Amino acid sequence: MGTGAVFAVLVTLMGADGGAPPLRPVDLYPALAKVTFVIETGTKHGSGVLVANNLVATNAHVVLGSTKVKVRQGKVTWDAEVFSADEDRDVALVRVEDLDRSPVTFRTEPPLAVGEKVFAVGSPLHMDATLSDGIISGLPHMEDGQDWVQTTTPISPGSSGGGLFDERGRLVGLTTLYLLDAQNLNLAVPAAAIHELQARGAGVVQSKKARQGTKTPPPDAVRCLFTKKEVLAKFTAGLEVVESSAINQSLWLRGLNTQILVMKAVNGAVMEFVLEDVNARGERVFVTAKEAGRRVVVSATKTGAEVTYLQPTQLRGQPRVVAVTTECAPTLAAVIDAERAAVSRAAWSETELQRYKNGCERGSADDCRGVLAFFTLREDTDEAREAADRLCAVSPDDCPPKSKESSPPKGDSSR
């Protein structure tokens, strides 16, 4: 499309009146992509849309709790900071200096109607500036007072905070979540919530709902012991447990607060999952691409995390789901990172231990983590404490938090 056509689209976006004709998606896209950004925090990524001079709107759950926020478009990255946010409405504004371009136009009139054509632009699964389309399928008002724009426009992890636009390119909402157990049921925060946040000015409005998982994320690494396995079947009345049996299986999970979760069994088997969704209950849902249907659902608890592992199966042609759920205790990420291909205690020989000790004495943080992992798996508390102290001396950044707290000051005779 030529320069003149792009200019015509921009004029339409920035100053269209209600009588302007709808634009084709191919004509809309260049202007919408120009005001769409990727939001990155180091552990999370989402989307955003330029709504005012140097202000990019996104979802609050994308940026709150992060110490660093960056806004990216293509290969250009800007440092950013949270200017204002509302946890309950799940809306945030991040300030980006020297973002020299015109913001998007908001849809103010007429009111949205079910059946209207809409478009979403965001970065689902790191696919930058992806365009998808659908219709407005509902305008629900929830019991908690929250209004939503319900749409059939496909969204995926990474779409959070991206713009939802009408056929004239005007912003009508921010794509926020989708329901796993529903068919193409996606929700966006209405654009009016952005206007309200702008009117309040700087500051963060904390959640009054105390939603699980919003303020207390799960620990990054946990150790789980599963003792019961259930087989579920879907009947007309809903899911029912049709079989239950006792098991004894230990697993380590690493990366619960990142986009890649690593599951390690005591026999050394390793499986990777990718973050698919953070649902309205604050649960983080991970899936694996290798074996379709397998999921890990993680939610924070006061003592660690509750983990549910789901695996589809068949019984004489009938679909079933194997489910195991347990409370998991926090563990040291360094322990999991240090485990080699074979994780079982039998694989840890005294020769290997001595090799790790020698490397640790020479100042290798990797080998110090290996010594710590050896004694932690053996449940040798005293040796593990000494190994943790040595790791702290070699690499303070890898120092386990418990070691920092439990080490008495020099000269303390309380030992």
Image (cartoon, rainbow, N blue to C red):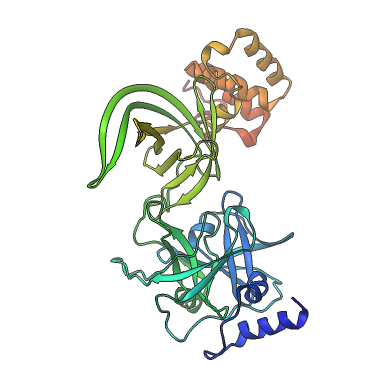
Residue 148 percent location from the top left of the image: 39, 69
Question: Does 397 appear above or below 109?
Answer: above
Tell which residue pokes out farthest to the front in this image.
Answer: 317
Question: Does 380 appear above or below 214?
Answer: above
Residue ID at (53%, 17%): 375
| For residue 400, side relative to residue 74 (left or right) | left
231 vs 317, nearest the viewer: 317
Quarter of image, res 53: bottom right
Residue ID at (64%, 59%): 128
Residue ID at (60%, 9%): 349
Tell which residue pokes out farthest to the left in this image.
Answer: 237
Quarter of image, res 129: bottom right
Residue 89 percent location from the top left of the image: 42, 67
| For residue 346, side relative to residue 298 (left or right) | right
Residue 50 percent location from the top left of the image: 61, 72
| For residue 350, side relative to residue 89 (left or right) | right
Tell which residue pokes out farthest to the right in this image.
Answer: 3
Residue 39 percent location from the top left of the image: 60, 60
Quarter of the image for the N terminus: give it.
bottom right
